[in-house]
Image (tube, rainbow, N blue to C red):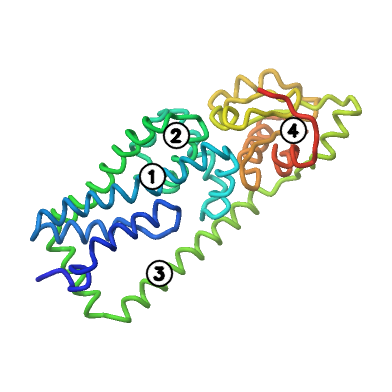
């Protein structure tokens, strides 16, 4: 059985276009197209090599655009990406944690981690990674990712062709089923996120209230729970804030008096990291703790003083 005439004629253009769109951040999976290209390569090895080259080129073009944006606009690009993500609450933190653990080598494996592929290039740019190093590491990751998809399609070409035949047989019904499944997935992720936010809904403190407390000499303890990577990118903090390493939270707790107000801030959508830390502090007996509504971005937008790190 042959690959469908449409894919045989337009497959290479489809590979380039879908991979490019995916790398630009549109939630369109490129792996199925790579699998189809690999199945076609079982009949024509040269087709597989051209598909790989086009897919890698598409990755480099899309990723370099985000790298350049991150180099120029810093953490503002991360906020933009996370606003359009299906999982904005975890988007920034997961990427920054990956860079903390693996450094720039994160670029090599980023495309295999959902949510990390699009965010990793602008983080690398915001951290000041040289363009040559970015292209080398990201290129290696692109070859690994695209090559894996094409290789799997080549190995399982019989199964891939069987799937294509079923889709062709079903025709419009197959497209309708796929559309319904995609809509259900997006709706589920949205509903899951709303439940998560509601579960974490704790009494927050506004930046105005925190400022009044500081001006009145109440000396609240302000904890900065952003990742090290984010602090390096941003370079600012609320005056007197103490950075907290989430991997060593217990050590931080030892120095926090139980009779002081504690304010926790981050730079996450919906203050998710700050809320989680506040809940952990409460479980450990520190009751007068609240997340800062809007995080450091709200503090800066209100025009209050900041410190350079």
Residue behind mark 2:
98
Badge 2 or badge 4: first in the primary sequence: 2
User: Dots 1 and 4: beta carbons under 8 Å?
Assistant: no
| Camera-side mark, 3 or 2 | 2
Q: Which residue is depicted at the point 45% across and 53% down?
A: 25
Judging from the image, what secondary structure is the residue with disc 2 in?
A: helix
The reply, left or right, for residue 204 in relation to residue 88 is: right
Judging from the image, what secondary structure is the residue with disc 3 in?
A: helix
Q: CA distance from mark 3 to mark 4?
A: 42 Å
Q: CA distance from mark 2 to mark 4?
A: 26 Å
Checking the image for residue 90, the label placed there is: none
User: Dots 1 and 2: beta carbons under 8 Å?
Assistant: yes
**How many badges with numbers are in the image?**
4
Judging from the image, what secondary structure is the residue with disc 1 in?
A: loop
Q: CA distance from mark 3 to mark 2?
A: 30 Å
Badge 1 or badge 4: first in the primary sequence: 1
Judging from the image, what secondary structure is the residue with disc 4 in?
A: strand
Q: Which residue is depicted at the point 72% across and 22% down?
A: 256
Residue behind mark 1:
113
The reply, left or right, for residue 189 in relation to residue 20 is: right
Q: x and y percent of residue 103 in the render? A: 42, 28
Badge 3 or badge 2: first in the primary sequence: 2
Residue behind mark 4:
263
Q: CA distance from mark 1 to mark 4?
A: 32 Å
Residue behind mark 3:
181
Q: CA distance from mark 1 to mark 2?
A: 10 Å
């Amino acid at each position: 059985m042959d690959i469908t005439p449409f894919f045989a004629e337009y497959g290479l253009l489809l590979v380039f276009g879908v991979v490019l769109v995916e790398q630009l951040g549109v939630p369109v999976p490129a792996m199925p197209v790579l699998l189809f290209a690999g199945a076609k390569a079982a009949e024509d090895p040269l087709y597989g090599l051209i598909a790989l080259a086009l897919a890698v080129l598409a990755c480099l073009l899309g990723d370099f655009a985000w790298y350049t944006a991150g180099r120029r606009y810093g953490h503002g690009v991360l906020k933009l990406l996370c606003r359009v993500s299906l999982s904005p609450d975890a988007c920034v933190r997961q990427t920054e944690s990956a860079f903390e653990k693996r450094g720039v080598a994160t670029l090599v494996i980023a495309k295999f981690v959902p949510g990390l592929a699009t965010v990793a290039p602008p983080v690398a740019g915001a951290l000041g990674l040289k363009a040559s190093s970015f292209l080398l590491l990201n290129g290696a990751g692109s070859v690994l990712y695209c090559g894996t998809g094409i290789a799997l399609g080549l190995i399982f070409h019989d199964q891939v062709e069987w799937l294509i035949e079923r889709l062709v047989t079903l025709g419009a019904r197959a497209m309708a089923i796929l559309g319904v499944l995609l809509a259900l997935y997006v709706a589920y992720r949205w509903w899951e996120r709303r439940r998560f936010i509601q579960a974490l809904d704790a009494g927050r403190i506004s930046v105005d209230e925190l400022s009044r407390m500081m001006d009145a000499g109440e000396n609240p303890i302000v904890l900065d729970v952003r990742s090290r990577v984010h602090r390096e990118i941003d370079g600012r903090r609320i005056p007197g804030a103490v950075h907290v390493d989430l991997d060593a939270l217990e050590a931080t707790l030892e120095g926090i008096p139980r009779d002081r107000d504690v304010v926790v801030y981050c730079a996450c959508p919906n203050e998710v990291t700050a809320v989680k830390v506040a809940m952990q502090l409460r479980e450990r007996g520190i009751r007068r703790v609240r997340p800062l509504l809007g995080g450091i971005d709200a503090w800066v937008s209100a025009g209050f003083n900041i410190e350079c790190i």
